[in-house]
Each structure stands twice: as C-alpha cells, then as structure tokens.
C-alpha cells in the first residue's frame, strides 16, 4: 500500500542508553538492563517508517520503550544514537537529531505535532484554549491576530470544543476536553506528522471512545500521518493501519494490524492478543 511512497518519517537504529554501556552490553542484557554494567537500554536499535496518510501503532507494556521513542522524536530526549529523517525537513535527506536548536524548533513547530498522555505536559493550563493554539502558531512565526483567532475557532470546532468556551482555560475542563484542546493545538500549523502518546489512558471508557472517534475524523479530514503509542491493543485495532510491538526496548514483531491481531507470532504478542479477547 505504501511501498512506492517516500516515508513521511524514517527512523534507523534509534538507541537510548542510560549508563556507561560496557563493550559487551548486548550479550549480557537481562530484559533491557546489562547485568555487567547496569546500563539501561530504553530503546535498542529501533527502525521503522511512517507513510503519508498512515497510522502506525506502537504497542507494548510499560517500560517497553514506547514513550522513550516518542520523546526522542519530539526532542524531549536526546538519543544515544540513530538516524531520523522527515520528508518535509531538507527533503528527507538530513538527520533530525543532528539539527541545531533553531531547526529542531522549526521541526517541532511546523512539521510535527505532539499530544502527551498528560495534558499538563502539552498545554498551558492557565491560558485560554484559543491562546494555547495561538502560542503554537506564534512559535511558527505568525503574528496575525485575526488569522490566529480564525484558526483557533476552526480547530476547536473540529475537536468539538464549544466556541463559547474558547476563552476559558483548560484547567476548568474535563480530562477528555483537555485532550481535545491538546489535539487542536498540535494541529495548529498543519503538521505532516502527529505523535499521540497514550492519549486515552486514564479517561473513562465513554470519553475514550469519543477521543478515538475524533482522531479518526481528524485523520480523514486533514490526511495526516499518525504515530500512535498505546499499551492497549483495542485502541491500536481501532486506529492503526500497521503495528509494531515493543518489549524491553526492542521491536519484537511488526506487520499489518489485522495480521498482528489474527496471527501473532511472538509469545508476548500472543499474550497481548489473548488478553484482548
């Protein structure tokens, strides 16, 4: 389906290691910890692609490396090694982790949008919802107040936040509404890639369903590529075209989501799928 396309995002051999990393770490790992030097390999040689209009799911238990991967991509965490290429940054020919501070800010503000598990990490809770969106637009270089207001109205309407509340601060909103404001902020500058990190964790089931429906609608409306992290295969099944399964900092299985769910090959994936049934 995507084989003839240039990836929106390509990651090669991403590694995040905490500790000195002795020369023989890889041969003495107990889960993701080296028994010789106690180094922790939070991400261990991770490679994958995301294509235009695709949702790639990343599933795994806590500590599997999912959030480490997302934080690395959004420059919240500096990788130990690896290469990352984004189609809209220097024609996909330059490693994003070698970019200087100005280019990293440009990538964050113009090419990617991030929605964190905890809305506090992605929103200014004391600012209005409209001001949160405006902050993202200003960070990309715009200063036109009328255009920012119009964009805020468009996005808040798209995520089903009543415009009568656009001047209200997210601290007054429910968790589900805060996530929707976060999504609208992430979309402010028409990013090519949307990063979603456990966006439904902690929400009531009915609210989860609304947020997931919203993400599907946003994907169709904006034809955006999505990297979706979750520990919940039910979320992955609903949204992801392809899925990679992570365990102890490594990718242990990958494929079309239907294939992963119907015929899992790795013992851990089989346990995950079994818990879903």
Image (spheres, grey):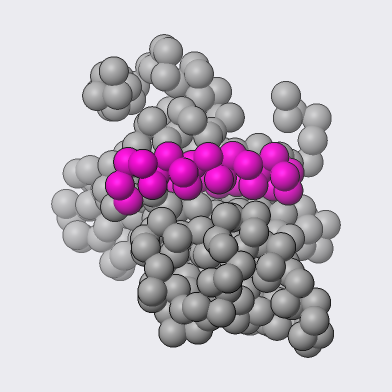
Camera sees residue 258: yes
Is residue 205 part of the magenta span, yes or no? yes
Instruction: Please identify the dominant SS of the magenta region.
Output: helix
* Residue at the extreme top of the image, as rendered: 263
The residue lying at 55 percent from left, 23 percent from top is 256
Camera sees residue 98: no
Residue 31 in the image, given as x and y percentages of width and height: 23, 43
The residue lying at 60 percent from left, 46 percent from top is 226
The residue lying at 30 percent from left, 24 percent from top is 276
The residue lying at 80 percent from left, 77 percent from top is 147
Q: Is residue 192 left or right of residue 170?
A: right
* Residue at the extreme left of the image, as rendered: 35
Residue 262 in the image, given as x and y percentages of width and height: 42, 13
- In terms of depth relative to the viewer, which is nearer, 267 or 209? 209
Q: Which residues are magenta?
A: 203-231
Q: Is residue 54 above or below residue 115?
A: above
Q: Is residue 239 above or below residue 9?
A: above
Quarter of the image for the C terminus: give it.
Answer: top left
Is residue 235 part of the magenta span, yes or no? no
Residue 18 in the image, given as x and y percentages of width and height: 31, 65
């Amino acid at each position: 389906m995507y084989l003839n396309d240039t990836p929106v995002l390509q990651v090669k051999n991403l590694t995040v290691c905490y500790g000195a990393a002795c020369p023989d770490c890889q041969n003495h790992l107990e889960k993701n910890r080296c028994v010789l030097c106690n180094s922790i390999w939070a991400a261990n040689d991770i490679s994958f692609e995301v294509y235009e209009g695709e949702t790639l799911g990343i599933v795994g238990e806590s500590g599997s490396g999912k959030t480490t991967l997302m934080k690395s991509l959004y420059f919240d965490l500096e990788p130990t090694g690896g290469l990352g290429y984004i189609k809209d940054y220097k024609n996909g020919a330059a490693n994003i982790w070698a970019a200087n501070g100005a280019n990293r800010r440009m990538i964050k503000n113009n090419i990617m949008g991030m929605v964190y598990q905890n809305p506090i990490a992605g929103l200014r809770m004391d600012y209005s919802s409209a001001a949160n969106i405006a902050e993202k637009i200003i960070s990309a270089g715009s200063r036109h107040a009328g255009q920012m207001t119009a964009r805020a109205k468009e996005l808040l309407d798209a995520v089903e936040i009543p415009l009568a509340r656009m001047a209200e601060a997210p601290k007054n909103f429910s968790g589900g509404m805060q996530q929707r404001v976060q999504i609208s902020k992430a979309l402010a500058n028409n990013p090519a890639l949307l990063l979603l990190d456990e966006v439904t964790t902690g929400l009531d089931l009915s609210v989860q369903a609304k947020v997931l429906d919203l993400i599907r609608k946003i994907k169709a409306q904006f034809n955006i590529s999505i990297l979706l992290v979750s520990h919940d295969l039910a979320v992955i099944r609903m949204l992801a075209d392809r899925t990679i399964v992570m365990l102890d900092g490594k990718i242990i299985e990958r494929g079309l989501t239907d294939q992963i769910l119907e015929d899992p090959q790795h013992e851990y994936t089989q346990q995950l799928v079994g818990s879903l049934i």
